[in-house]
Image (cartoon, rainbow, N blue to C red):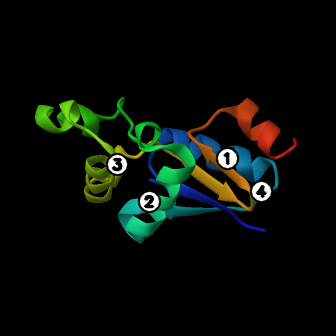
Amino acid sequence: MTTLVYGIKNCDTVKKALKWLEENQQQPKLHDYRVDGLNSDWLAEMETKFGWENLVNKRSTTWRNLDESIKNNLNREMALRVLTEQPTLIKRPIVIKENIALLGFNEKEYQSAFNQ
């Protein structure tokens, strides 16, 4: 079964996750937000899994360039809107396979989730 990886193909963290998944026979398939788009229903589903606070990548250039009024007043509704408008603000990658849902890349978490 394919492991879906959501992110941006030129992101180093996404590259690390894809490499790890390939090396561990997880058949990763990348969904690149810039190429394949972003579905607001999917994003809302990810918010229920991870929480909007965890989806927002506050280390990103996109975050640093956001208007201060948005950063200072961020709530669930505003976060979902901003993430839809600016998918590069989403922490990456998001990895989904059957009952596995991972945010970011941490090799120990991946090993545990995929029983490696």
Residue at x 29%, y 41% (from the top left corner)? 75
Amino acid type shown at disc 4: Gln
* Disc on res. 113: none
* Disc on res. 44: 2
- Which residue was labeled with disc 4? 26
How far apart in space, not on screen, are marks 2 and 3 (Cα)?
16 Å
Camera-side residue: 99 or 88? 99
Residue 49 in percent (x, y) is at 57, 50
**The C terminus is located in which quarter?**
top right
* Contact flag, marks 2 and 3 (Cβ < 8 Å): no
Q: Which of the two discs, 2 and 1, labels the residue nearer the N terminus?
A: 1
- Which residue was labeled with disc 1? 19
* Disc on res. 88: 3
Query: Badge 4 local density, few (<14 within 10 Å), some, or many (20+)?
Result: some
Name the side, left or right, on which 102 lies relative to 58: right
Q: Secondary structure at mark 2?
A: helix
How far apart in space, not on screen, are marks 4 and 3 (Cα)?
25 Å
How far apart in space, not on screen, are marks 1 and 4 (Cα)?
10 Å
Nearer the viewer's eye, disc 1 or disc 3?
A: 3
Q: Secondary structure at mark 1?
A: helix
